[in-house]
Structures are given as C-alpha cells and as structure tokens.
Amino acid sequence: MKRIFVVILLIIASVIAVCQGINSKAIEITNVDSDDYTTIETTKLRLKLPKTFTRRNATTYENMLAESYISVQPLDGDVNRNFYTFDKKSMFQAGIVVMKETFFKINGFEAMMIDGDQFINDKEFAVSILIIGNCTEAFLIMGSTPKPIQNNMNIEITNSLLSVIFDPKMETKPIGESFSYKVNLEGTGLIECPPMGDTRTFTDDGNLPSKTDDMTSLTIHEAHSGIQLTEAQKKDICSHRIGLYPLTWDEKSDLTPQKYSTRKLSGYEIYASGVSKFLKTEFIYQLVLFDKDRYFVLTGISYGDEAKCLEMFRKVANSIEF
C-alpha cells in the first residue's frame, strides 16, 4: 500500500543497540554557538547555513536557483540504532548509492555522515546525510545539490551539516506554530506527528505509520504554483494525484473531482475505495484547496469505517485558518 511519502524513505530495522560509540575512531569536532547560527524550528538543532540559502519552511532551507536544499527530519529511537538502520542496503533501496561513511563525535554526541549519489528524473544529485543524537532521540540532516557540482555547493552543504549543534535541553516550538496555517483536531482523535518538509501528518495514534488496525492517517501538503491556476488546471492536479495510488478501484467509485468549499478556501474533492496489493479494502480521501498562488493537498487514508473517516477528514479541512 502506498502510504505517506517520506523524503528519505525511512527503513525500520529490528536491531537492538546500546548507547555507546559505534566507532571508536570517530573524528571529533567542537562547534561553538554564534550569531550566524540558525535554530531549526521544532528540532533541537542549530546550523550554520550557507549564506545563499533561504527558509522554505520550518525544517527546510534551500537555494532555488542552484536546486539545492538542506532539510531536517526527526528519527525514532537512539542514534546508534539509526546508524544501523541507514546502512548501504537500505539507502540503495531508497535510491541513494552510498559512496562513503564517516563517523564523528560532535560536541560529544555520536554522529555519522553518509555521502552518496541519487538520480531523480534522470538527473544526478550529490547527497550528504548526517545523523546525530543521543540514547533517546536522533535527527537526520540531509543536503542535496545537482551534479556536476558548481560553486563548491557540495562543500558548503557538507560544512553546514558538520556545523550542527545538538542541544537535548533546547525547548522546541509546537509543530503547528511553524506553519502558515492552523488546524483544529478537537474531536477527531487524530494526533500530529513530526513534520516532513512542507507536509504535516496526523494519525489515529500519533505513530508514523499508525499501529492501529484502521491505520488512519491524514497529511496536509502545502505547495506553491507561483501562478494563478485555471479551474481546468486545478481539476487536473486533483485527478493526477488520485491516479497515483496503486489500488484497484471499486466499480462504484467516482474519481471525478467535485467542487468543495471551506470557510476560507475552495477546491476539488475526490474520495473512493479500492483494493490494495494486500487484498485489503482501503479508503482514500483527497481534497485540494487553492489560495492565490499556493494550494493545500489533503490526503486521508484508512482501513476503517468510511463514513466516519469522511466526516473526520472534512472536519479537519474545514478548520484550516490563517
């Protein structure tokens, strides 16, 4: 079943690790905080970002002209377990060919740098990933830039990742405060999970993925079109996205986008049921809401009661405020 798209395609591994250094020959780095550091919201990290990078959202900074970015993702479990999780095999399954692994101790905290190559739409990118944390929490910082490298952008990204300051005592902002919009989850039973770039995720138990039988989840992805879209283009966006799901749709399902409006926004809605490759009936809800040169894609997925899920997903959509 095609569920929530994760930028790095996290692979869960059943490895029991203890809080000790994975490599006794780790390179030691001491970073000193200063005014040129940026706090990465909703995390416990500060980074010295490349000067040409600007904020895209709470956890992602980019240079649009150079097609380069740095993004932060929280990880489950202790840092050493995640070192084993992100091995060469799992990274290859995620589309990244690992060229080099280097271990560090940064301000006394265990860290691992992965350097590799990734092809996206027939274009080659240089990718650097740094994992850092302690026994109870860890973070992944990913930087990417096209190859062949120009203006030493890969060096700037590497230096930025290695400038990291991890502070377990740092107070973090609530997730919702880092986005341009608010949602009300009261009465829905949904719990917000850590964000992934421009995407917020809510599940019925707060785990990602959900561990309940229904496995109910809702994502809200904010995208920028840069232009005012026509009604035909809006419908095309909605139709295209629903067509990406690898399901055999129920014969009664209508995949025609239908007009839908909230108090603030309007767009197109589609909901239908289909059978996944696991031969389970899955309910898919999709709503695309438009606001000037940006739009919000709400995607709800569940094995549970369709009527209740439809009501729940619409309730969250109707609560979007700016």
Image (tube, rainbow, N blue to C red):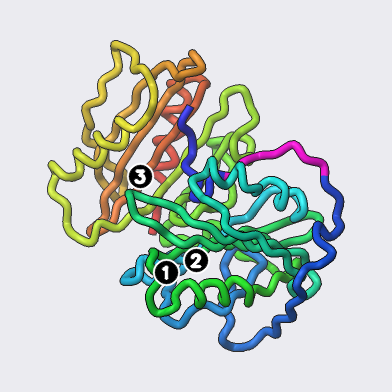
The amino acid at mark 1 is Glu
Residue at 83% x, 60% y: name it: 21
Identify the residue position indicated by label 3 in the image.
297
Q: Mark on residue 287?
A: none
Identify which residue, 154 or 308, lies in the foreground: 154
**Which quarter of the picture shows residue 232?**
top left
Residue 306 lies, with reference to residue 23, above or below; the image says above
At 42% across and 57% down in the image, what residue appears? 181
Q: Nearer the viewer, residue 134 or 89?
A: 89
Q: From where the camera sits, is residue 11 visible?
A: yes
In terms of sequence position, does the residue under pointer 3 or pointer 2 come before the other?
A: 2
Taking the spot 51% from the left edge, 52% from the top edge, the residue there is 196
- Real-space Cα separation, disc 2 to disc 1, in angstroms: 6 Å
Figure check: 115 above or below 90: below
Could you tell me the amino acid type at mark 3? Val
Amino acid type, callout 2: Ile
The mark lying in front, picked from 3 and 2, is 2
For mark 2, does the 10 Å Cα neighbourhood hold few (<14), some (14 to 19), or many (20 or more) residues? many
| Residue 62 tag number | 1
Dot label at residue 70: 2
Relative horizontal placement of residue 137, taking residue 227 as reference (left or right): right
Task: State the SS at label 2.
Answer: strand
For marks 2 and 1, the one nearer the N-term is 1
Which portion, as a residue range, is magenta? Answer: 10-16
Main SS category, magenta section: loop
**Is 13 part of what is drawn in magenta?**
yes
Q: Are marks 2 and 1 in contact (CB under 8 Å)?
A: yes
Describe the element under mark 3 as helix, strand or loop.
strand
Q: Disc 1, disc 3: CB below 8 Å?
A: no
